[in-house]
Image (cartoon, rainbow, N blue to C red):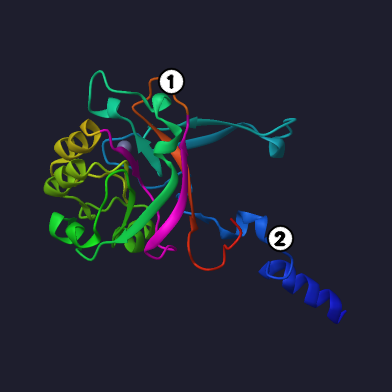
Amino acid sequence: MSRNIQSSASLSSGQHNPRMSTVASSEWIDVSVPVRNGMVHWPSDPPFQIERIHDMQRGDKSNLSRVVMGAHTGTHMDAPLHFIANGKGIDEMPLDASIGQARVIEIRDTESIKPEELKQHRIRRGERLLFKTLNSLRGWQTDSFIEDFVFISKEAAHFLAQRGVALVGVDYLSVGGFKRDGPEIHLALLEAGIWVIEGLNLSQVTPGKYDLICLPIKLAQGEGAPARAVLRPIGTGRRQRK
Ligand SMILES: [Zn+2]
């Protein structure tokens, strides 16, 4: 009995059996939001709707759903085509744009992300940056749209473009503010070849370095698409294999 308890404890901690530590699922943090009826959406975008058109509870042989949604529902990515008429679609995104090392930066400003704050973080060319703001704490607590969410100021968007980062992720539904420079902010990032993740929930994530995997649905010529995004800490001392 006590041996069983001990072995299950060591299995869950993954420390005693080196093979267990290669099972990485417990290390990954899901930073995407659940997609469901009634969830928050950008005011001018269609609401998300899912409906069982085959339902085993009604005697059907299987369950099968019809989904009606905007391409920018919940956690999603923007392609250049969103604001550039002949830009790349989401199906043309290089996979390493959103798979690889990323840095989570905590933003203290509760209004917007500004260059003055970004300059303190020594941002380098080619980085993948995810901004954790006040949005992660309050944005996903409600199904109502929050108008005064923290966004990337246009000055910061131009700063990030100049630095040549590879990817930017934000923790609410747009990189731009609500009725505040949305097109200009998107355009500054997308024209610089920066791929964009919107709608992350970073509430469970502390600032630092992570492995990122974020893969949008391969919508042919889509200007954006819903995505699943996960992070795994790097350099915490736990991962000494490799
Ligand atoms: Zn979008």
Earlier along the polypeptide chain: callout 2 or callout 1?
2
x and y percent of residue 83 in the render?
Answer: 23, 28
In the rendered image, the vertical position of residue 144 relative to residue 67, given as above or below: below
Give the residue drawn at x 21%, y 31%.
191
* Residue located beneath label 2 in the image: 20
Residue type for callout 1: Ala
Q: Secondary structure at mark 1?
A: loop
- Residue bounds of the magenta highlight: 193-217
* Magenta-drawn stretch contains 97: no
Task: Mark 2 and ligand 1: say if the CB distance to the nearest ligand atom is below 8 Å.
Answer: no
Report the residue that reaches farthest toward the right. Answer: 1
Of badges 2 and 1, the one in the foreground is 2
Asked if residue 48 shows in the view, the reply is no
On the image, the x and y values in percent for residue 159 come to 16, 47
Residue 76: give x, y in percent of width and height: 39, 40
In the rendered image, the quadrant that contains the N terminus is bottom right
Left or right, 157 with respect to 210, comes to left
Q: Circle 1 sits on which residue?
A: 220
Depth check, front residue: 99 or 112: 99
* Badge 2 amino acid: Met
